[in-house]
Image (cartoon, rainbow, N blue to C red):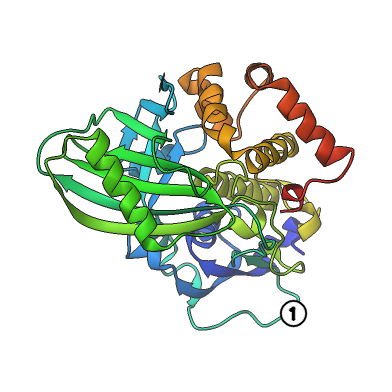
Amino acid sequence: MIRTASLEQTELAIIGAGCAGLSLARQLVRTEKTSIIKACLYGPVSPAATNRHSWGFWATQGLKEQTELSRQRWHKWQIITAERKVTQTADSHPYCRLDSRDWLTHCLNIIDGNIQQKPDNLPTPGAQPVFDSRPPNVPEGALLQHFKGVEIKAAQPCFSPDTAILMDFRCDQSRGIHFIYLLPYSPTEALVESTMLSPKRQNDDFYAEAIKTYLETYWATGGWQVKHTEQGCIPMAFVQPVNLDYLPIGANGGCVRPSSGYAFAFIQKHTDAIIDRLVLSGTDPLTPATMPRPISRFDLFLDRIFLHVIRHHPEKAAELFAQIALALNGDEFARFMSGLADFKIYAKLITAMPAGLFLHALWNIHVTNRDNADKK
């Protein structure tokens, strides 16, 4: 429990030196009123600090510093199905790729000498508040977003560096919802990921073959060299914190949006909200029950329905994602994906979705309570 009336006497612990833990530590140090807190960071620094991963987000409010650190930005992106190609353009909110090494090193440089680090220990249970970023408990059979990607150098110019491809469904759909994610760095360089939404991960050969077939079919690369590989698995589910007595942050604190798997922007939003609570909440205690929400209840309500639909009707997923993109302009899409939608955006989305399909999902979830995906 943290009471902000006596921050100078406060001691707290942060478990996990990954994106969430280091982002919170950074803000504690940078914010004048919380810099007096005695904080200790437990656990080794994430491998993502030295082994790069690509973190995507839209440049929205509160992410100026993160946007400036991003290596690529696209004001235009596409969602492609077998039937259509939807192109969106954003004036104010470009899509950004942040190298994990850049962000984590930036955070480490800020906290160096200001926050004690104990890479080989965990905090001793006691009176001090503990922010916990360890992986959450994921329900068995939950829908997962699992992927493997490669950064490639093509033998000849073929990519359009001004347009990111967020989803291209022109790939093998026999094992579940499957799309290619392509971020072009230059006419000859790109990150290409094979991504699936299903409860079961595939073997590495499946992703590699999907990328190979996709590049050979749709891009005149003239051959390519693999410069780097990365992979991951993100739960698209409603998870439970690993320790209910601690203050959950990161994925453990619900910062992964269930319907998309995006997390970085929500981690930053959650971090800012925690700092605000520490600074502004007077003598109100910060407890697991009073922790700020990184994602609104209404967005989670919509996500639950959407996940029910695509889990029970995976063959409709590609068209549903395309319909979402068709319903909004680029800046509206960016705000929706970042948890910043307003009534106008929600109205556009709801009217664009097939009413019967979504009403049936709503009935199953909230009336008959027969939705297995809802429990996951």
Query: Which residue appears at 70% of the width and 49% of the height?
Result: 277
In the picture of the structure, the residue carrying the numbered disc 1 is 126
Point 51% across, 25% down: residue: 322
Residue 4: x %, y % from top left = 73, 56
Inspect this view and state whether residue 123 appears: yes
Q: Amino acid at mark 1?
A: Gly
Residue 368 percent coordinates (x, y):
89, 41
Say whether residue 271 is left or right of residue 186. right
Residue at x 79%, y 53% (from the top left corner):
290
Residue visible at 22% across and 41% down in the picture: 216
Q: Nearer the viewer, residue 243 or 115?
A: 243
Residue 264 against residue 63 in the figure, above or below:
below
Left or right, 262 with respect to 90, comes to right
Who is closer to the viewer here, 184 or 125? 184
Residue 206 location (% of width, % of height)? 38, 56
Mark 1 lies on a secondary structure that is: loop
Q: Is residue 26 above or below residue 272?
A: below
Residue placed furthest toward the front: 174
Can residue 249 be seen by looking at this rendering?
A: no
Image position, residue 185 (x, y; %):
24, 39
Classify residue 313 by image quadrant.
top right
Q: Is residue 32 left or right of residue 131?
A: left
Mark 1: few, some, or many residues within 10 Å (few <14, many ≥20)? few
Query: What is the quadrant of the C terminus in the image?
Result: bottom right
Image quadrant in which you'd find residue 72: top left
Residue 49 or residue 224, whichever sits in front: 224
Quadrant housing the N terminus: bottom right
